[in-house]
Amino acid sequence: MEKIYLIIGLGNPGREYENTRHNMGFHFLDCFARTHNVTTWQEKFGGLISSFSQQDHKVFLFKPLTYMNNSGEAIIQVIDYYKIPLQQVLILHDDMDLPLGSYRLRKNGSSAGHNGLKSIEHFLKTQNYQRLKFGISKNAFMDVKDYVLGKFNADEQAVISSLEPTIISLLDDFLKIDFDLLMNRYNHKK
């Protein structure tokens, strides 16, 4: 029987939010989509959805268009509609507590103040869902909202670009191996 996976990238829709720190989830989901020749996205469930098949897997890619703070509202619709078990769901998002250029897989945990994750927790009614966090560092001299909605400079963009091949491999492996093994394989790397 076909196994269904769902990979979700968090971000804000609209041109003004492209290449902002808060849109790391969208960015890496788009990179992954391109490697699988996914070019057509359909507006459904309050977001943009696409899919591809690989061996005995159907893989859905989803970008909520509800704005970050209401991400859970769109995500729960996709999960419920396709009846996807949470262990086959992965959420990609930015994280200010990690340095730029780093990433971390987690199986559960609190939202740590991330409004997108707070919304997801609210709708899933659990903190036990898998995520891939991308470091965006912190800026003590800037308001958090201004910082996360700010764009990367050229040097930062280069750091993000250099991560892309690793993240694509990681997402391909997410479709093949157990999540604990995935964490073992990738979490120790910078």
Image: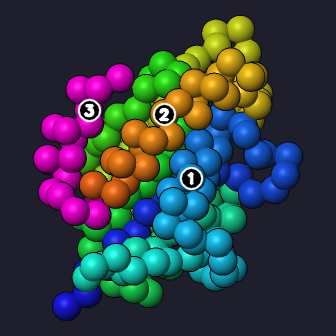
Residue that appears at 65% across and 44% down: 23
- How far apart are the alpha carbons under marks 2 and 1? 11 Å
Pair 3/1: label in front: 1
Residue that appears at 20% across and 53% down: 179
Asked whether residue 58 is drawn in magenta, I would say: no
In this rendering, the answer to whether 97 lies above or below 40 is above
Residue of label 1? 31
Pair 2/3: label in front: 2
In the image, residue 161 lies at what x, y percent? 58, 34
Residue that appears at 35% across and 34% down: 104
Crowding around mark 3 (Cα neighbors within 10 Å: few <14, some 14 to 19, many 20+) is: some
- Do we see residue 167 in this rendering? yes
- How far apart are the alpha carbons under marks 3 and 1? 20 Å
Residue that appears at 54% across and 48% down: 28
In this rendering, the answer to whether 176 lies above or below 93 is below
In this picture the colour scheme is: rainbow
Which residues, given as a range, are shown in magenta?
174-190
**Which quadrant would residue 7 be assigned to in this image?**
bottom left
Reading the chain from its start, which is encountered first: label 2 or label 1?
Answer: 1
